[in-house]
Amino acid sequence: MTNLLITSCGGLTSYNLIYLIKKKTKFKNLRIHITDKKKNVKAKLFSDSFTSLPDTKNKNYFKSIMKIVNNKQIKVIIPGSDEEAEFFSKKKKYFSKKNIFINVSDYSSYKKFISKDRFYRELKHYKIMSAKEWSLINNKKDLVSKINNFIKKKIDFVLKPSKARGGRNVYIFEKNLKKQFSKNFNREKHIPFLRLEKYKLKYLKVNFPMVIMRKLYEPSFDIDILCFKGKLIKHVTRQRIGAQGIKGNIIKRNNLKFEKLSKRIAKIFNLTGLYDLDVMLNKKKNPVVIELNPRISGSLSSSIQAGYNLIDDFISLTLGKKISTNKVAKDILIRR
């Protein structure tokens, strides 16, 4: 019997994810145990057990996790939030000694992509992203100087926090835009150059450090990547339909540019496990990775629904079993 623990399953995407894992799995003896801070969680309808846990900062969090691990004989843990990914990365060696596989990098690797500026520094070092494409901002004086530089050169640009969840407080400044608007559940604001010059910074939620970079273009993609010791084992590329893929995903047929990018990221950060890459396109329509998420995406359910069960592959990886390396041969539309 394989007992799997998935944390932070309170969202709507988690409901569909747990349902599809149970429905599509090839493991007849798979048991899924889930947790969340909330008590009323829909995903528990499809799980084998549910436990409401405190925040990771709570001194009882680790004790609560260990109680589940011992009572349910957990062998695999998949953190479902950034905070839990960081917590478990610091405890990875502890769990490894107990032969429990944690789907997160150890902290020495994890801290290299814990924030966007650290992540982009690594990409710059390996010549995946150039110094012209982004810059770190630590104070208002530096912010004004770099904003004015983009405006002077008439280059559309993006301003965003170095560390934030779900694309929050992102500002996109465009020279040809006539009217300000918001999207992505009001997390992303598009602002004309002229308004920026008139109102300066008074309406921006500035929280340093911040990253300023050239604007990238839609469509937006997620790449689910399964890795082992820095080697890409399997990947599935999903094109988002609507903000955060709220309306669904298009599972894209294999693209060599996306595959090459995924291989490089897996090697650079020495990844083992299942992760999610956020990707957009530059002006030349080449993929640019903007974030390496230290955990699985809830929208992984679309990949599973399309017939690419990366959770089963992940479990096989932890058991030392062979994994089919079939690639996506055609686009598949998955609606929510």
Image (spheres, rainbow, N blue to C red):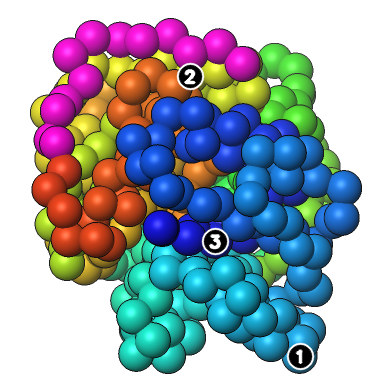
Q: Which numbered disc, 3 or 1, marks the residue that appears first in the sequence?
A: 3
Q: Is residue 49 above or below residue 168?
A: below
Instruction: Answer few, some or many: residues within 10 Å of disc 1's Cα (few below 14, many 20 plus, some between 14 and 19).
Output: few
Can see residue 134? no
- Looking at the figure, which quarter contains the N terminus? bottom left
Can see residue 232? yes
Q: Nearer the viewer, mark 3 or mark 1?
A: 3
State the residue at coordinates (38%, 19%). Answer: 306
Q: Which residues are magenta?
A: 324-336
Q: Is residue 325 above or below residue 60?
A: above
What is the CA distance from the residue labelled 2 to the residue labelled 3?
26 Å
Q: At which x and y percent is residue 310?
A: 33, 40
Q: Which mark is residue 206?
A: none
Say which residue label 2 marks: 249
Instruction: Answer few, some or many: residues within 10 Å of disc 3's Cα (few below 14, many 20 plus, some between 14 and 19).
Output: many
Q: At which x and y percent is residue 242?
A: 60, 18
Q: Foreground residue, 91 or 125? A: 91
State the residue at coordinates (27%, 22%). Answer: 285
Say which residue label 3 marks: 5
Q: Which mark is residue 59?
A: 1
Q: Nearer the viewer, mark 2 or mark 1?
A: 1
- Looking at the figure, which quarter contains the C terminus? top right
| Circle count | 3
Q: Is residue 78 magenta?
A: no
Q: Which numbered disc, 2 or 1, marks the residue that appears first in the sequence?
A: 1
